[in-house]
Image (cartoon, helix red, strand yellow):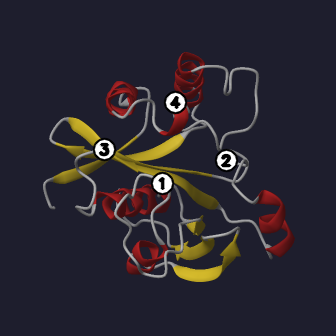
């Protein structure tokens, strides 16, 4: 696992991200991981529109992710951002009704390339997001994984944000349920001391 590296999603790494998405048929329903961003005219119109929207958001500095590289090829990713950057979470009404405070950051989507799933890359992507959040000053981080009761499913393609068990292994603690089968996991991330 030590051969994998993390890079932030930036205009310079966007083509690597795009290649990963294209190899995986546009991600979930060709959303290009725009679903969690605020609504706008471009969102959800087409795969091409979603790609252009994501590229614009990255260029504007309001779309963040940790890309996992195997050599020079991006093979996994974890999207993260502030609640303002990523407001469109599933079960939002229930979430808001039960929230004591909003996090500084949320992890909303994790994707691992088909054929490489089951090798721990989702955890590496989550760890990469946490590292990048620490470099940005840290804070309270939330994730919304699937609570599978520790049972590994044969088809993991629906696990758009990993599992509760994986989050627990990465230092997150259970906060509360969210919708049917998901939960809120939290972790306080200290600012990075690395330059």
Q: Residues within 10 Å of mark 4 (few under 14, many from 20)?
A: many
Q: Which residue is mark 2?
A: 86
| Residue under the image location 54 percent in, 38 percent down | 33
Q: Which mark is residue 30?
A: 4
| Residue under the image location 52 percent in, 24 percent down | 55
Task: State which tag comes first along the sequence, 3 or 1.
Answer: 3
Q: CA distance from mark 3 to mark 1?
A: 13 Å
Mark 3 vs mark 1: in front: 1
Instruction: Give residue 148's position: percent from left, percent from top.
Output: 49, 75
| Residue under the image location 39 percent in, 58 percent down | 156
Task: State which tag comes first along the sequence, 2 or 3.
Answer: 2
Left or right of 154, for residue 2: left
User: Circle 1 — which element?
Assistant: loop
Instruction: Give residue 35's position: percent from left, percent from top.
Output: 63, 40
154 w.r.t. 77: above or below: below
User: Circle 2 — which element?
Assistant: loop
């Amino acid at each position: 696992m030590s051969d994998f590296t993390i890079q932030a999603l930036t205009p310079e790494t966007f083509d690597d991200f795009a290649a990963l998405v294209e190899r995986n048929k546009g991600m979930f329903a060709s959303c290009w991981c725009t679903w969690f961003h605020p609504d706008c005219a471009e969102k959800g119109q087409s795969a091409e529109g979603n790609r252009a929207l994501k590229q614009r958001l990255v260029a504007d500095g309001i779309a963040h992710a940790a890309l996992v590289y195997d050599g020079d090829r991006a093979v996994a990713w974890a999207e993260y951002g502030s609640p303002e950057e990523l407001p469109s979470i599933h079960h939002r009404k229930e979430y808001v009704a039960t929230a004591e405070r909003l996090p500084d950051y949320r992890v909303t989507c994790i994707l691992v390339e088909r054929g490489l799933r089951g090798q721990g890359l989702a955890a590496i992507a989550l760890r990469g997001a946490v590292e990048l959040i620490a470099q940005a000053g840290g804070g309270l981080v939330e994730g919304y994984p699937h609570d599978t009761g520790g049972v590994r499913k044969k088809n993991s393609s629906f696990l758009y944000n990993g599992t509760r068990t994986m989050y627990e292994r990465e230092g997150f603690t259970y906060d509360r349920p969210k919708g049917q089968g998901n939960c809120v996991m939290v972790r306080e991330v200290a600012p990075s001391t690395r330059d």
